[in-house]
Amino acid sequence: MSDDFLGDLHDAMPERPDDHAQAALAEASGWVGTHGVEAVGLGEGEGGEQQVVVYTSGSPDEIPETVGGLSIRVERTGPVQAYDGSDDADRPDDSDGAPTEPEA
């Protein structure tokens, strides 16, 4: 394996979130299950800055613009359901590879 490959791989890897970003994510994690918030995570803004990503199936009007000093990006999604693998009958049908649509 060449050093160029390893250097490129290292450059492509995201940096570990700093304590400030982890604290903002911890605060935003408390929103899961409220106001349609399905999940939260850390992402990167257009300028490379860390931001909190909020995945919601509800109205984004209830979500603030910042948390812990980080900007928030809202991504609209359907309801998120955990799959524990214990019963394939409960697994959504994704046999054609297309994303499944949430049930109305």
Image (cartoon, rainbow, N blue to C red):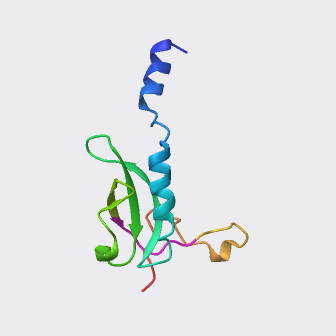
For the stretch drawn in magenta, what is the main secondary structure?
loop
Which residue is nearer to you in this view: 40 or 23? 23
Give the image location of residue 95, x and y in percent.
Answer: 53, 65
Q: Residue furthest right?
A: 86
Residue at screen point 46% across, 36% down = 15
Quadrant for the N terminus, please.
top right
Q: From the viewer's perspective, is 22 left or right of 75?
A: right
Q: Residue furthest left?
A: 47
Quadrant for the C terminus, please.
bottom left
- Whether residue 96 appears in this view of the structure is no
Residue at screen point 46% across, 19% down = 7
Give the image location of residue 16, x and y in percent.
Answer: 50, 39
Give the image location of residue 67, x and y in percent.
Answer: 37, 60
Which residue is nearer to you in this view: 76 or 66? 66
From this view, report whether residue 83 is shown above or below residue 36.
above
* In magenta stretch: residue 76: yes
Residue at screen point 51% across, 59% down = 26
From this view, report whether residue 23 is shown above or below residue 34.
above
From this view, report whether residue 93 is shown above or below residue 27.
below
Residue at screen point 35% across, 54% down = 69
- Whether residue 66 appears in this view of the structure is yes
* In magenta stretch: residue 63: no
Q: Residue furthest bottom?
A: 104
Residue range in magenta is: 75-81
Q: From the viewer's perspective, is 28 left or right of 75?
A: right
All told, the count of numbered labels is: 0
Give the image location of residue 76, x and y in percent.
Answer: 35, 69
